[in-house]
Image (spheres, rainbow, N blue to C red):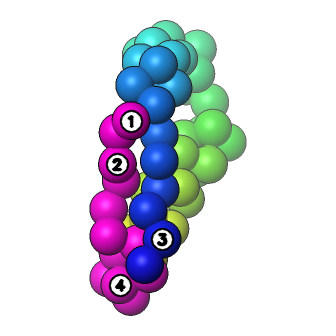
Amino acid sequence: MQKLTVSREECKAFIKLYMQEDIQKSKKIRKYISNIFNGLRKSIKEKKATGVKLS
């Protein structure tokens, strides 16, 4: 079982970027973000990852 580790700073930076309007308007980045989360969901379903662990 692999665990995906994301630091709190990374999360904060990611959220800060996502909250900026110009990035929200960018479909490319939105697609990239949803691909990441879909990939996570998929691997959790397949029991490859147990979830996202905040360090």
* Image quarter (top left, top right, bottom left or bottom right) of the C terminus: top left
Quadrant in the picture for residue 16? top left
Question: Hey, what amino acid is under mark 2?
Answer: Lys
Q: Which residue is drawn at 35% across and 39% down?
A: 54
- Distance, label 3 to label 1, CA atoms, is 15 Å
Sequence-earlier tag: 2 or 3? 3
Q: Determine the residue located farthest toward the bottom in the rendered image.
A: 46
Q: Kindly report which numbered mark, 1 or 4, lies closer to the viewer in this rendering.
A: 1
Residue 23 is tagged as none
Report which residue position mark 3 lands on.
2
Q: Image check: 16 left or right of 28?
A: left
- Distance, label 3 to label 4, CA atoms, is 9 Å
Residue 45 locus on image (x, y percent) = 32, 82
Q: What element carries label 2?
A: strand
Sequence-earlier tag: 1 or 4? 4
Sequence-earlier tag: 2 or 4? 4
* Image quarter (top left, top right, bottom left or bottom right) of the N terminus: bottom left
* Total residue callouts: 4
Up-down: is 53 above or below 48?
above
Report which residue position mark 1 lands on.
55
Report which residue position mark 2 lands on.
53
Question: Hey, what amino acid is under mark 3?
Answer: Gln
| Residue range highlighted in magenta | 44-55
Q: Which residue is drawn at 38% across and 88% down?
A: 46
